[in-house]
Amino acid sequence: MAVPRFAATAAPAEVAAALRSDGCAIVERLVEADLLARVQGELEPFLAATPTGDDFAGRRTRRTGGLVARSPTARELVTHPLVLGAVRDLLSKATSVQVHLTQVIAIEPGEACQAIHRDQWAFDFFPFPAGYEVQCNTIWAMTDFTPENGATRVIPGSHTLADRLQFREADTEPATMPAGSVLLYTGALYHGGGANRSNATRYGVNLTYAVSWLRQEENQYLSVPREVALGLPDDLLRLLGYARGAYALGYVDDLRDPLDALRGRGPSTNFGDLAEAQARLRERL
């Protein structure tokens, strides 16, 4: 089964439909390759200082996080309307979504194929019900993704399979795409970083989102220092987690909205949007 592919003019609902049916989708040339080059330039000192990982993360792979604080240009990727629209569509059973993690994944020559896995296993291996998506991930191609240089390996349709399965590289296919493209995939899709058999490093920007009632993999409140957060727009701050995750989840002290607390505004008088919470309860019933 091939990965569904879309042009940059695709509607978010089209991409979300592919994520539901196939677990993954590629939008080709969604941004100019120069934009990714700017991200890489802004992050160069951090990329150079990042150590390589362990057997799972990759002995020849560097994972540099904190992108919202470290790269102003990366914020454009985090808030890209087509991606956000597809993510919110896929995860629409939840009240809101949040940034789960931000990182550049640099796979160096000689790296082996990563163990095939599901990203949602990060939630303490909780067995979410089949078909109930809680996470949506993206990999933006900073460089061309090819079978030789470590293009992400995916198993289209595997988001519907049983949990804790084991796969080999031969069971997967490479998500090849030109620089400026983005691969989207659900947290339940079996996938892994590809082996880099070329002589150049493969760079990709990994931005992932999850429903707001789950803990973030990358702690955004510490990754983005307060002095940086105060200069960010409200929409991005809410996406980073300065918002209630649902009715009554995540308020501060005297029922304050997290964004009000950050901005130094006064207390609220309620837990959140009661009308919306009641409407969602009626839907469930």
Image (cartoon, grey):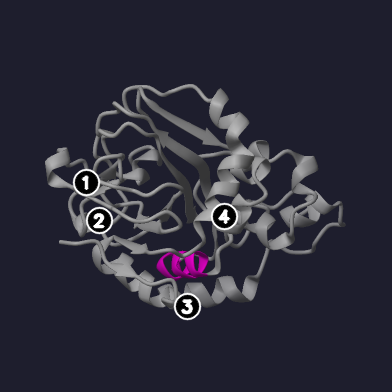
Side of 196 relative to 93 (left or right): left
At a point 24% along the width and 45% down the height, the residue shown is 147
Q: Is residue 178 above or below residue 229?
A: below
SS class of the residue under badge 2?
helix
Residue 89 is a magenta residue: yes
The span from disc 2 to disc 1 (Cα, nearest Å) is: 9 Å
Q: Main secondary structure of the magenta part?
A: helix
The span from disc 1 to disc 4 (Cα, nearest Å) is: 37 Å
Side of 8 relative to 191 (left or right): right
The circle on residue 163 is 1
The span from disc 4 to disc 3 (Cα, nearest Å) is: 44 Å
As rendered, which of 264 and 246 lies closer to the eye? 264
Q: Crowding near pointer 4: few (<14 within 10 Å), some, many (20+)?
A: some
Q: Between label 1 and label 4, give the one nearer the viewer.
A: 4
Q: Which residue is mark 4?
A: 35
What span is in magenta? 82-93
Q: Which residue is mark 3?
A: 282
Which kind of residue does numbered mark 4 sit on? Leu
In which quadrant is the N terminus drawn? bottom left
Give yes or no for contact between labels 1 and 4 (Cβ–Cβ under 8 Å). Answer: no
Q: Quadrant of residue 45?
A: top right
Q: Earlier in the sequence, mark 4 or mark 3?
A: 4
SS class of the residue under badge 3?
helix
Q: Between label 2 and label 4, give the one nearer the viewer.
A: 4
Which kind of residue does numbered mark 2 sit on? His
Which kind of residue does numbered mark 1 sit on? Asp
Q: Earlier in the sequence, mark 2 or mark 4?
A: 4
The span from disc 2 to disc 4 (Cα, nearest Å) is: 31 Å
